[in-house]
Image (spheres, rainbow, N blue to C red):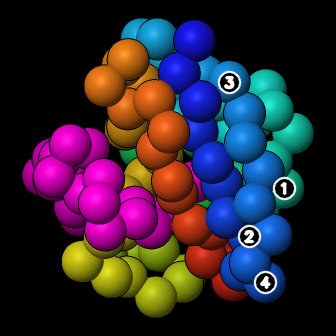
Amino acid sequence: MPRVSFVHPKGESQEVEAAEGSTAMRAALLGGISGITADCGGEASCATCHVYVAEPWIERVGAPGPDEDDMLDFAECERRPSSRLSCQIKITDELDGLVLTLPESQ
């Protein structure tokens, strides 16, 4: 089962298992990661699962789609080139070891 590391704003890291075919958001919720509230339940309509993808993973994760891109413009926290909604990051075996950093607030 792929593993995803979530790095909190103060630098502490938590690693969780993520079911292949699921999303990084679902893995965070099931793994008890604080900082991801996912108010819309994974519909890409709230930006409360905003994360920053670590540099080595950006290409493998890919760019946000048009709807996700629009929603990221409304996120409360700073948008960066590495910003993604974790509900839109589909977990595959190729993403085993993925590192995502949580913003200061959602």
Relative depth, front residue between 24 and 38: 24
Q: Residue 39 at x, y = what percent? A: 68, 47
CA separation in Å, label 4 and label 2: 5 Å
Residue 8, disc = 2
Give me the residue at 46% from left, 11% from top.
Answer: 20
SS assignment at label 3: strand
Nearest the viewer among 103 and 67 is 103
**Callout 1: 10 Å neighbours few (<14), some, many (20+)?**
few
Judging depth in this view, the residue of 11 and 39 nearest the camera is: 11
Q: Which residue is mark 1?
A: 34
For the point 78% across and 51% down, the residue is: 14
Residue 67 in view (yes/no): no
Q: Amino acid at mark 3?
A: Glu
Q: CA distance from mark 4 to mark 1?
A: 13 Å
Which residue is denoted by mark 4 in the rendering?
10
The quadrant of the rendering that contains the C terminus is: bottom right
- Left or right, 6 with respect to 21, comes to right
Q: Are marks 3 and 1 in contact (CB under 8 Å)?
A: no
| Discs 2, 1 touching: Cβ within 8 Å | yes
- Which amino acid lies under the numbered mark 4 shown in the image of this protein? Lys
Nearer-the-camera pick, 16 or 48 = 16
Q: Tell me the amino acid under the disc marked 2.
A: His
> Which residue position is annotated with label 3?
17
- First to last magenta residue range: 49-71
Instruction: Identify the residue at image location x=79%, y=26%.
Output: 30
Marks 2 and 1: which is nearer the front?
2
| Disc number placed over residue 89 in the picture, else none | none
| Mark 2 → mark 1, Cα distance in angstroms | 9 Å
Q: Earlier in the sequence, mark 4 or mark 1?
A: 4
Q: Is residue 25 above or below residue 8?
A: above
